[in-house]
Amino acid sequence: MKKFLLSLPLLLLLAACTQEPVVDYKVWYDWPERYLPDFSTLGEPSLQGVKDNLDLVGLDDSRDHFCVLFETSLAVPSEEEYSFRLCTDDGSKFYIDGELLIENDGAHAPIEKTVSKTLGRGRHALRLEFFDFDKGQSLIFRYSTPTIREQELNPRSYFKEDRLTSKKGFVKPQVREAYARYAAWKGDDETLVFPILTDVHTARRFSYKHIGYGATAAKIFGADFMVNLGDIGLNAYPATVDSEYAQWVLKNTREQMDKYSGVWIYTPGNHDWDGGEGRWHSEQELQDMFQKPWLERAGGNLHLVPERTYGYYDIPSKNFRIVFLNSSTTRTLGENYYLFGDEELAWLEGVLEETSPETGIVVLSHYMPHPMGRWTTSHPTTATMEANLKLMDMLSEYATKRTIVGMITGDSHTNDFAVYNGVSYFVTQGYGDCTLAWMLPTNRHAFFDYRQTLCIDMIAVKPSAREVHTFRIGAGGADFDQVFGY
């Protein structure tokens, strides 16, 4: 039997090439400039530590005006051409072995840059400089070679997160805690009850699983239907630059929605139009994916407008009509970021007119037309503001002769409630991240770890008391319940 002896230098090289890279990071808060600093002049960092990848996961995304220095190394087993892709909001610079390869400095929306370089065998020093000015932040770093599919430094971290989110022991206890509050409030009265999922796009890679967790909540509460208020994530990075990822999101979202045996109500969000790499979904495609599948289950009670993503769902047994709107008429391509179009508003007016005065009308939308629901940095155009006011005035007019329960939306990643001319408006937080500087004075947000906590509002309407009670499942608990009349 032959023995093979490896030299110590070779053993060390092999160990280096198989060990997962560790990323050292340093964060400095209160960086006021619109460009990267000279990090050597900054002094002691506000925060430092180690992480798996060159990204912002685990850092405080509620803050603006900070800069980060990442340093690590990449083990190269054999000489090969490496391609690096970096997309950041705001500025960044990327170095290998001290050489500046990507210059993407300045305050700006997400900008992607790529570069290729042949790297020799051994370990190479990586340095990434990043800063955030305001209005959100993002950092995506990937690399690939002819033999390595595009990946992060430690792609196995995805599998670790997947295993963590697969431990569903946290789901039913949180649902049952909220159900106990609901049962005590409900008593023997009849209710209309449904859970709302919204804005799962910012709850990281495996957030789609929470749609399936919502189905568990619907079963325990005996829900009449389920609601997805949009922002599944097809127009959020990395889907916009990766059509394969976008299709992965679609596939898994639908699989989770299919776990519920009843009817889903879906309203398109501003992050649902992109199919990846510039391919935009039409309203017909979104209707085919997220609205038509439930037609047979609805037994003729689900009414969809042809080639549009708005309609209504009747529940004759409880005398309710659920109207769902598309608040992204111009998508994100035009200057009107959010807009209820004239055609849609004319249709809505007709639906309200034909609805029996005794039938309770619930209006659903991704975007909130009331000022409390807008991102303070969105700067709605005149056309958007006029459409918002037209919609709210229409609901107020019909509230004098119809039973308008209220309008419920997502989008803002906060909770809030207001009444305008006799109509109640409620914003549900959902899974979206929140930047404190963007919040309006009346907004609230429950910060939580989506891997261990749900964030679902169960909406219950009690006709005998003309009352609506929302029950928070998970994040914030009973402190985020809301009660209002109609």
Image (cartoon, rainbow, N blue to C red):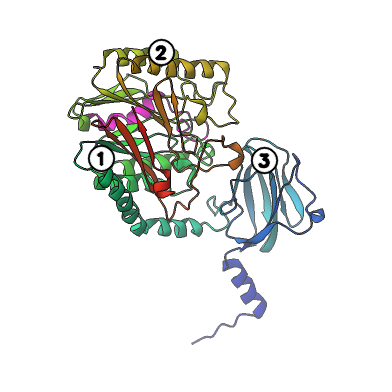
Q: Hey, which residue is sitting farthest bottom in the picture?
A: 1
User: Could you say where residue 241 lies in the image, as x and y percent from the top left?
Assistant: 54, 38
Q: Is residue 20 visible?
A: yes
Q: Quadrant of residue 399?
A: top left
User: Could you say where residue 173 lies in the image, as x and y percent from the top left?
Assistant: 32, 56
**Label 3 – label 2 distance at C-alpha:** 38 Å
Mark 3, Cα crowd under 10 Å, few <14 / some 14-19 / many 20+, is many
Q: Hey, which residue is sitting farthest front in the picture?
A: 465
Q: In the rendered structure, which segment of residues is drawn in magenta?
A: 272-295
Which residue sits at x=60%, y=72%? 15
- Give whichever of 295, 280 is nearer the camera: 295
Numbered label attached to residue 343: 2
**Label 1 – label 3 distance at C-alpha:** 43 Å
Residue where numbered disc 1 is placed: 223
- Inspect the image, locate mark 3, and give the three-letter code of the amino acid beneath it: Asp
- Give whichever of 415, 241 is nearer the camera: 415
Q: Earlier in the sequence, mark 1 or mark 3?
A: 3
User: Could you say where residue 333 lies in the image, as x and y percent from the top left?
Assistant: 54, 24
**Label 2 – label 1 distance at C-alpha:** 32 Å
Residue where numbered disc 3 is placed: 90
Which residue sits at x=62%, y=39%? 437
- Inspect the image, locate mark 2, and give the three-letter code of the amino acid beneath it: Glu
Q: Earlier in the sequence, mark 2 or mark 1?
A: 1
Q: From what the image shows, is residue 72 above or below residue 228?
A: below
